[in-house]
Image: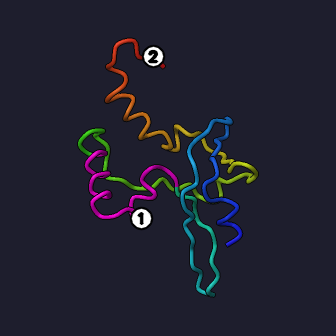
Amino acid sequence: MYLMRLVLDKEIVDRNGHKAGKVNDLMLELHDDGALQVAAILTGPDSFVSLLPDWMDLATIWVRTSLLHLDPPDPIEIGWSHVTQIDVAVHIDLDRVKAGLLRTQEAVWKRWLKPLPFSER
């Protein structure tokens, strides 16, 4: 329980020092001896969809598939072995783009913002 309090809702920082989202949940692994071990951290806007009421879950799926042309939601899993440090943030040894941590932001940019006049990055 202490680990969850220490890690949940913390900012994720990639290996280049860029913000990459927040830790929304932890995936635990149950071993044969009954011990629990952290397998991964879950992040992304899709990691909490299952906690929403059914109608909000369906609305989220509709927005992703119809408006953003993304696959149905799946949380992004970052293996616990990629966590390098935990302080005010959770540091990982992955690049945020290559790990897929910006897929929703990129979809919003390409579909809705990039076509606008004077939009630049």
* Quarter of the rendering occupied by the N terminus: bottom right
Dot 1 crowding, Cα within 10 Å, few <14, some 14–19, many 20+: few
For marks 1 and 2, the one nearer the N-term is 1
Q: Is residue 5 left or right of residue 20?
A: right
Q: In the image, what residue occupies the spot 39% across and 63% down?
A: 50
The amino acid on which the numbered mark 1 sits, given as a three-letter code, is Leu
Between 109 and 32, the one nearer to me in the picture = 109
The magenta stretch spans residue 116: no
Instruction: Say how the picture is coloured.
Output: rainbow
The magenta stretch spans residue 47: yes
Q: Position of residue 59 (x, y in %)?
A: 28, 52
Q: In the image, what residue occupies the spot 45% across and 16% down?
A: 120
Q: In the image, what residue occupies the spot 29% across and 64% down?
A: 54
Residue 120: mark: 2
Q: Position of residue 2 (x, y in %)?
A: 71, 70
The amino acid on which the numbered mark 2 sits, given as a three-letter code, is Glu
Q: Is residue 22 left or right of residue 93?
A: left
Q: Eyeballing the image, is 36 above or below 34?
A: above
Q: Position of residue 46 (x, y in %)?
A: 42, 53
| Disc 2, SS | loop
Question: Which residue lies under the disc numbered 1?
Answer: 51
Q: What span is in magenta?
A: 43-64
